[in-house]
Image: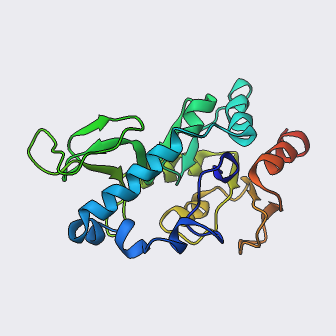
Amino acid sequence: MSAESGISTFRDSGGLWEGYDPNVVASIEGWRQFPDHVQDFYNQRRAQLAEVKPNAGHKTIAELETDYDVTVITQNVDNLHERAGSTRVIHLHGELTKACNETKTEVIEIGTRAIQKGEKATDGSRLRPFIVWFGEAVPLIEKAAKIVSTADIVVIVGTSMQVYPAAGLIHYAKSNTSIYLIDPAVVNVASNVTIIKEKATQGLAIFKCQYLP
């Protein structure tokens, strides 16, 4: 969803995982063993976020709120949906512009600033990125599943459908729900899904013009 804004992705060719070991920067074990390395990685992501803007796809989704009840469920940790104007956004994997203590009981807004080496939360533990890493629970997944289960239309944008539990949300949709998948790559999904094989911006424009009631 954010690739066309200039946000590097993890899984695509040239994505972040080609330069960083996901077992380190995207796992709780990596944080415990190499906190400075992981902290630096997310500091870089925040610095990048400060330089980019929402793309036309983000804006299309936000504009849909004029006529529809829209909830965005995203695996992205950037704030581009909010900056585009979306008012109901569920971040399954955390938020880059927030930090927390080790137990995630204290969450603070930090914007796009760096977390300094050795910086502490108020409880004395290390201040860490407010990110859901591999090896951690996804606390908002049940809320997301409930929303999908009541949706009349589900639009899936720019995902490999390989990261669980998020990839499993599609199975909560009602049997009569209209489901669309927008992605330029080949993604294995059920036959009842309408595929729009385009990048997010173009695909959402097509969806809005051709498929919305």
- Tally the numbered discs: 0
Relative vertical location of residue 209 with respect to residue 68 in this rendering, above or below: below
Q: Quadrant of the C terminus?
A: top right
Instruction: Pick the residue in front: 211 or 77.
Output: 77
Residue projecting furthest to the left: 124
Measuring 75% from the left and 38% from the top, which residue is drawn there? 56
Measuring 71% from the left and 71% from the top, which residue is drawn there? 189
State whether residue 97 appears in this view. Answer: yes
Image quadrant where residue 18 sits: bottom right
Relative vertical location of residue 201 with respect to residue 164 in this rendering, above or below: above
Instruction: Pick the residue in front: 16 or 193.
Output: 16
State whether residue 78 appears in this view. Answer: no
Give x and y (percent) for residue 10: 55, 65
Measuring 66% from the left and 72% from the top, which residue is drawn there? 13
Image quadrant where residue 40 sits: bottom left
Give x and y (percent) for residue 107: 27, 39
Residue 151 located left or right of residue 181: left
Instruction: Pick the residue in front: 66 or 29.
Output: 29
Residue 3 located left or right of residue 95: right
Colouring scheme applied when the structure was drawn: rainbow
Image quadrant where residue 208 sits: top right
